[in-house]
Amino acid sequence: MPPPGKTHRPAEIGVKVLLDKTTPCYHFSATLQNSQVECRASLKILDSDKPPAPQELITLLNQAGVTESLDLERLAIFCAEAARGTNQSDVLLATGTPPSAGIDGWFEAAVRTTADEAEFNRDEKGNIDFRTRDSFTNVEPDDLIGIIHPPEAGTPGLTAHGQPIEPRMGIPLDIRAGEGARLDPDQGKAFATRAGRVILENNVLTVSEQLIIPGDLDLETGNIDFNGFVEVRGDVLDGFHIKAARGIKVAGNVGACRLESGGPVEIGSASGKGKGEIRCQGPLKTRYLNEVLVECRGDVTVSHEIRNATVKATGRIMVPRGTISGGETVALEGIEARHLGSVSGHRTMVTAGVYFPEEDRLNHLRYRLKSTGSQIQRIDDTLGPLDPGKQKLQALREALQLRVDILTERKQKLLAEKETVKKELDRFKPREHPTANPKINAGAGLREGVILKLGDQVEEIQIERGPVSVIANHTGDGLHYLKLTPLKVSAEKLEAELEEKGIETEKIDRENAQ
């Protein structure tokens, strides 16, 4: 439905004298006012013994064109008051029909815009999720974002003396297309030219690729699902989530939340309390990561510390001035930190040269294979003693047979699942990753309790080592502990240099251990 049209009061065109009659007995005059919609009259009695009868004034007004609009009851009162000696001045006796104003042109939004109030979502049972607010609609290029309705004509009116009054036409909508929007005058429609959210401000229609939260992400703003870039200039409180197609930036701390980005992520810090998750398709930059799960398709750069977190990257994991302590870090292109491990010797797992999506899939398949095997074995152990035929009571035989049938059906499904998993495992072949760099750098030292994994070789640090670069030892057991070199110097190059110089790896390892 269109919004109410603006009220246009007809322009006052002055007072028009309709009639002016003087007799020896009275003086009667009538005028048209308020754009001739009103007929007002004045009556002065000159001879109190001979006041005019209402019918006489009705005849005069009818002759002037005032007929159907005349209020006869009011005219009778008008004459009676004058006969009693009360002069009647500018009394309303007839009213025409004022024209109705035309409806102005208006914009009908096909999506939620920033001008709309946010709404809460309800689930199937009618429960409200106060963390999820429907405050805008994500649009894609060529999506319809609104219809521009033309102005409409109003309803004609009538003057008090029966003349038609032309209505005023509504005012056309003055709307303009800003960035990301396109107007089609022929269709009277507006379309998006890029992905984002629709903003209608000061009659300018734009599609913004950016959503800025000026403070914290909390109940006032709710969870965010946006196909553009999201910037939060405060904190993201526990239990709130952000999903953004182009990237996320948070100035403050991210709590026990879930961040999902189709681009880069930059945050002040993350304290996930064992529940927080960050998944991004671009690099991640932050000061701290604490008790949070990170899966990053790019580099992870942390200025201060990674503590008790699981951090996986298809690029590098860099903490050049800080510490990685506790948890697990996995990177395809190498890992570097000033310190690796905690002073208390808490378990710290560090893996380099591994493409974690493949590794995770492989581990998942192995887990499913083991799990289905265990479930099949438990069913076999349960089915063994069950023998419905030995039961004398029919009801008991039927109950046992039903249980056997259910377990057998479940076993067949597990056997099929196990076969499917085995086939996928047999076909599984890790791809070649040219950027792989199975190298770990400790700028200041490796502490006890750190477990290093490079390729198929795993080794736990028993004694603290000074600045060191660690690579795999493909010609013998254990790992190579070498003089610290920049991470950009690949493990492959270092190993080639070792072979070229003919240096015994045992001697190198021994010297670097001292």
Image (spheres, grey):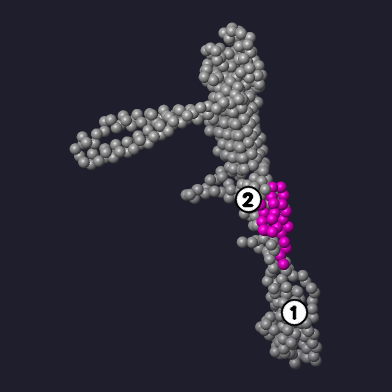
Q: Which mark is residue 103?
A: none
Per the picture, the main secondary structure of the magenta-coloured stretch is loop
Report the residue at 69% width, 63% height from top: 151
Secondary structure of the residue carrying tag 2 is loop
The percent position of residue 315, horizontal first and vertical second, equals 61, 27
366 left or right, relative to 493? left
| CA–CA distance in space, label 1 to label 2 | 58 Å
Residue 78 colored in magenta in the image: no
* Frontmost residue, 197 versus 267: 197
**In the rendered image, which residue does mark 1 sit on?**
40
Report the residue at 63% width, 28% height from top: 299
Q: Are the residues flagged by discs 1 and 2 in contact, CB closer than 8 Å? A: no
Residue range highlighted in magenta: 169-191
7 vs 495: above or below: below
The percent position of residue 420, horizontal first and vertical second, equals 42, 33
Residue 240 in which image quadrant? top right
40 vs 460: above or below: below
The percent position of residue 242, horizontal first and vertical second, equals 59, 39
Report the residue at 66% width, 63% height from top: 4
393 vs 59: above or below: above
Q: Quadrant of the N terminus?
A: bottom right
35 vs 237: above or below: below
**Amino acid found under the numbered disc labelled 2:** Asp
How many residues crowd around disc 2 within 10 Å: few (fewer than 14), some, or many (20 or more)? some
